[in-house]
Image (cartoon, rainbow, N blue to C red):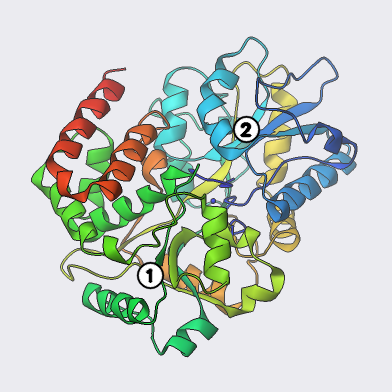
Amino acid sequence: MTDFDPGRRRFLGNLGLAGLGALGAGSLLSACASSASGPAKSGGSGAVTIQSNLSSPQAKTAIEKLAENFNKLGKGTASVNTIASETFRTQLPTYLTSANPPDLYTWYAGSVANDYASKGLLLDVSDVWQGLGEYPQSLKTLSTDAAGKQVFVPMTNYWWGFFYRKSNFAKWGVQEPKTWADFLAVCETLKSKGVPPIGIGLGDTPWVASAWFDYLNIRINGAPFHRELLAGKQRFDDPKVKAVLTRWREVLPYFDPKGKAYPFQEATTALLAGKTGMFLIGTFFADAAPKDALGDLDFFRFPIIDPAVPVAEEAPTDGFFASAKSANPAGTKELLRYFASVEAQEEYVKSSSGIVLPVHPKAKAADSPLVSKGKAILESAAELTQFFNRDSSDALQPTADTALTKFMDKPDQIDAILREWQASAEKVFKG
């Protein structure tokens, strides 16, 4: 569901609903190409309408397959509308507050779901969770709002990391860095060979920059401070946040200068073509990669900066929430039960690029070294974060987009940028 993501998510789009393409099926596929001008309507047929931001080809195929399979079960029918991810994110409040909203939505767990739930916009799906006894408590907590109701059903999660082509690293004579100093050394080597070391895709996906902010903050200040900052309990103009951008400034000379002009999909293409060396991105980016390139891809975790700070990793969880005004709450919940099943999650992995992690404890992930490595990275982490908007709200994400893209253009104006960011954030937190 991270077609982003944030949005949130292609490589590992399979890894965690990050690549949840579009939820459609068989005859429902005719609904797959709706415009984003307004919400789809459930109508009186009893079909469950899924509003999906999962538009990458492999993820879309996988979700359509799930919807098709659900329709064959005889427990209901589903139709899907696929919306470009950025449009989906900005229009989601409009969908949820419309008079006749779509029933079900591909989106994210955590604070972002709780934010919509606090406004009374999400369907209480606690009864669905009564049948999910095999799910770990951590996922149930992540899916629970401040009032104690479950409002989200997860299906996959995935990891972020620095992805690269193994053949290119070998050709360039570099190895995966472990520390920040190692990372700077790799960047310098690649730059000396005429290769922009770090890819970035900010075009119409400026949220990609938030991954850098998230990781630098959790590496320097730790995950607890990061969560407090995104909850409005700390300030963006705090010296601790200035330390984040100051550290980031050290590597700005190594970024692909063209990366500000195109989205992450094109940054993926540049990486695969050897036009950049590394790319900090979620596994969903692989949905845009040719199948024959997957075997040459590898990744390393964001380098350690302060060994005293417990290691945290970004592990966004993707799934679904439903409109409180759904015209067919019973059918919507039945579909959610299916998406939460071992059968559905294994089918999703099989039909997609296979680099996502199903969240059901008994569902099997793809058997590949890359997936095993990603799973191990998450399991070894002291803490897990989601992503900027997922740990805060969709309303706060644009403040990060503005501040961070401005910082990358004008890194000598950190103080002024952080003051502006704090002022913008205060407006969001005050509602």
Q: CA distance from mark 2 to mark 1?
A: 31 Å
Q: Residue at x 72, y 52 (%)?
A: 57
Asked whether the residues under the numbered discs 2 and 1 touch, taking CB atoms below 8 Å apart as contact, a structural biologist would say: no
Dividing the image into 4 quarters, which one contains the N terminus? top right
Location of residue 106 in the rendering, given as x and y in whole percent from the top left corner = 61, 38
Dividing the image into 4 quarters, which one contains the C terminus? top left
Sort mark 2 into few (<14), some (14-19) or many (20+) by Cα contacts within 10 Å.
many
Q: Earlier in the sequence, mark 2 or mark 1?
A: 2
Q: Tell us which disc is closer to us: 2 or 1.
A: 1
Q: Secondary structure at mark 2?
A: strand
**Vertical relation: 304 (above or below) 235:** below
Left or right for 183, reference 141:
left
Q: Secondary structure at mark 1?
A: loop
Sort mark 1 into few (<14), some (14-19) or many (20+) by Cα contacts within 10 Å.
many
Q: Amino acid at mark 1?
A: Arg
Q: Which mark is residue 105?
A: 2
Q: Amino acid at mark 2?
A: Tyr
Q: How many marks?
A: 2
Location of residue 246 in the rendering, given as x and y in whole percent from the top left corner = 16, 55
- Residue 8 seen from this side: no
Q: Which residue is mark 1?
A: 301
**Furthest-top residue in this view:** 99
Left or right for 24, reference 129:
right
Quarter-of-image position of residue 390 = top left
Q: Which mark is residue 157?
A: none
Left or right for 312, reference 135:
left
Q: Say which of 326 and 131 sits in front.
A: 326
Location of residue 307 in the rendering, given as x and y in whole percent from the top left corner = 18, 71
